[in-house]
Image (cartoon, rainbow, N blue to C red):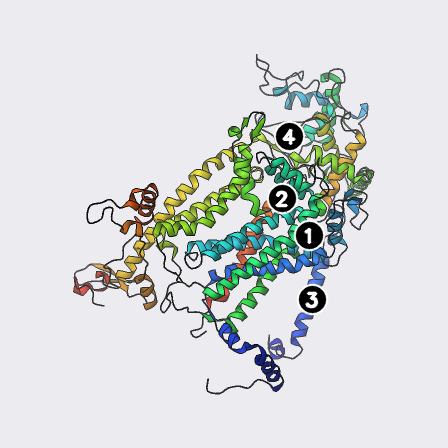
Amino acid sequence: MKWITARRRHPLAGYVVVILALALFGVGYAALAPTSDQAQAQTLAAEAPSADEVDIAEGKAIFDQTCASCHNYDGSGTYDEDGNVTNGPDLREVGPAAIDFQVSTGRMPSMDPDTQMPRKPMAMSEEELDDLIAYYNDQIRTDGAGADIPYEVPGSAPERANFEDEESYEEALAEYEAEYDAYIEGADNTDMGMKLYLTNCAHCHSWSGGGGALTDGRWAPEIHDASPRQIYEAMVSGPGAMPMFSDGVIAPEEKQELISYVKTLQAEPNAGGIFDLERVGQVAEGFIGWTVGLSLIIACAIWITAKQRAHD
Amino acid sequence: MSKTTQAPKALRGVGNFIDDRFHLAKTGEKNLRKVFPNHWSFMLGEIALYSFIILLVTGVFLTLWFKPSMVEIVYDGSYERLQGVPMSEAFASTLHIDFDVRGGFLMRQIHHWAALIFVASLVVHMLRVFFTGAFRKPREINWLIGVAIFSLAMIEGLFGYSLPDDLPSGMGVRILQGVMLAIPLVGSYISMFLFGGEFPGEDIITRLYMLHVLLIPALLLGLIVAHFMILWHQKHTQYPGQGRTDKTVVGTPMFPAFAVKAGGFFFFTFAVIAGLSAFVQINPIHLFGPFTPTSITSGLQPDWYMGFMEGALRIFPNTLDFSIGPYPILVAVLVPGLGSMGLLFVALGAWPFIEQWITGDKRAHNVADRPRNAPVRTGLGVAGIICYGVLWLAGSNDILSETFSIDLYLTTYIFRVLVIAGPIAGFIVTKRICLGLQRRDRETLEHGYESGIIQQLPSGEFIEVHKESSDETTHVLENKPAITSTALEEDETDDRGVENPEARKPKGKLRRALAHWYTKDNVSFEGVAAHSGHHLHHSADGDEGAH
């Protein structure tokens, strides 16, 4: 400290402080500045599993154990005499896309059939899900009803735990990312994606995909964690209060534009500052304006008027 | 001063030259030595002034590049994500400001944050004036000017919010148009006139731009100048204290002390706004994308100062709508959309005159009231704050519902109850608190303050020693203004037993009733001499008025 004390009144000290501060801000900004790197998406490259990769018997065991108590052993659901769903609806005509969506987003198996399920980690492994879907397609599904799983759309990213060594994991991840990027970049009509999203989706899921409140205590979930395949499946199966957007209403290429729009927007850096207020918008801005902005200024007013000399 | 310091010769020459022609020295001397009372709550209006200056400067910067045109072009600027997207020139030029103009993004954010702070500081300034009774004679005109500034600021903000033609802009304008259309008979004509045809048309941004950068700022500037000139002429109010009377102002001279403080305060205001703008993203138009008439999204609100109107629209029940023949009367849009705003400004504007009519107080007041000493006014103010606040919260009910996992419909019912019950409860509670504080004031005046020293008397009794308050405190407490009304002083009958004609009319009866309500609960300080209470004089019980 003595060294500083001796020199802090040096004529050049002010300049040194300014230069140091500028350097600190410059370097600090370079370190903190948002980069345009796309956020890593969390999803898995997979083709439709071939018949010898899946175990239908295993699928049946899973179904009987985790699904049948509500949806019945034949998938016909549980209903009271008036035809109202008691625990779980009929699954025979919903299609595998709905099963894949509900299970891969962790919403099924559900803890409480009466309330809307939030997104959770999946309750089973990818292989188990494949087995379950194979069993569903083989035994429960009626005449190929409902939407098929869009295997060409990238799903969830590979997880390290499913691989024996780092090398194979890295390889799978690179392959997945290439597939993901190809899908997202394969759509280049931002205008179409934006119009489709803002016309059909944003009034529930909000412009940012952050979700929103619905009527009767339900809510539209945020879709930031959803993989492109899950978004696609939600559109073709219409889970919960969501309407169904079949491939006839919004064509697969249009869905690709829409999904690409959402994912690109989500990965977009916040050019306006490091605090994006969760992209909540005006409510958060107003809150910060009052609690931080105006409060700080008023604190300063209190500070500069606090000291009062007797004669001024 | 015993020694006069001479200004440098060069300056003296210029100074004398000017003074010989304009005689500025005398006026300047007088004005520079004007004193300004020193209290933090007197600085709130200055925040508004400074943020207005920041708005003017950044606004001028933005106009250099902004193109108020709704001509559709295909974007090919440097923001890659939206390249190839058709949009209006207004939106494209805003993107240009954000991404191609050096410092443009920061300037736009400073402009927006300064707007939020500007209106917020107007509100807190107005509340200070209201609660201290600083709107009373002779300052009613300045209060009205302030209300006009507040209303214009809200409209100015709404129009500015609409200019970039991004998603929230368009939705805001759409709500504006909806409220317009609900006006009976002329609604559709007004809308067609303003938009130059059907919504959205091709004129609205050009027209709002003119209003936003020319007409309303000019009006605001004129009103702000008038506000200041009247303040300058009438001098600032001050809180009660020794030597502070309706005729004498105690404070800091304008120059140099107050000017230095005010100048520093400007820079602090600017620093906070610039700091927010540098680090906190506001209204990211590049993420929202351009508005198209088919676009609609949840989770978007107007800027905070329009929130109470949005909330009123959201919670007002639509069961009161009716039709006259084929013409629907949309009560659920008219009452909250126009009524909430009208009620706010009419109530604010009329209050000084209503209060004067109730109390019949025509004296000039330069010493501010302590809020507790006007319990009814303070209670009404708090009721107003609660009503406004509930409506404001209701404007964000979808965000609250999602953030705190409350049923959306339930929030509507809660707000409907609160908007009526809240102000009533707030009034009662506030008034009781004010009266309680008055009683404590009387206690302090009579007994001094509790010193925290416990003493044991020879009899074994423990007492807490009270000490005499400072002269300043005693002065303030002794001079509590009594709340009276001339309406109650007039006798109901004259000395011949004839009824007072004024008191017989309905207006006179109403005035008497209001006067009674306004003055009935009041803690009287009559007969209370300072420091005469027994706590100070245990040795001489009953020896009142030793001081």
For the point 65% across and 41% down, the residue is B173
In terms of sequence position, does the residue under pointer 1 or pointer 3 come before the other?
3
> What chain does mark 2 sit on?
A
Cα–Cα gap, marks 3 and 4 = 51 Å
* Residue drawn at point x = 54 percent, y = 56 percent: A294
Task: Report the disc number at residue A272.
Answer: 1
Residue contact between numbered discs 2 and 3, judged by CB atoms under 8 Å: no
Q: Nearer the viewer, mark 2 or mark 4?
A: 2
- Residue A100 x, y percent position in the rendering: 71, 27
Quadrant (top left, top right, bottom left, bottom right) of the N terminus of chain A: bottom right
Question: Is residue B253 depicted above or below B454 in this figure?
Answer: below
Left or right: where does residue A113 sit relative to residue B367? right
Q: In what element is the residue under mark 1?
A: loop
> In whole angstroms, how far apart are the C-alphas of marks 2 and 3?
32 Å
Between the residue at mark 1 and the residue at mark 4, the CA separation in whole angstroms equals 35 Å
Q: Nearer the viewer, mark 1 or mark 4?
A: 1
Residue bearing the label numbered 4? A107
Question: Which label's residue is closer to the chain start, 1 or 4?
Answer: 4
Task: Please give the residue where the numbered disc 3 appears in the rendered image.
Answer: A22
Residue with the mark numbered 2: A280
Q: Earlier in the sequence, mark 2 or mark 3?
A: 3
Q: Are marks 2 and 4 on the same chain?
A: yes
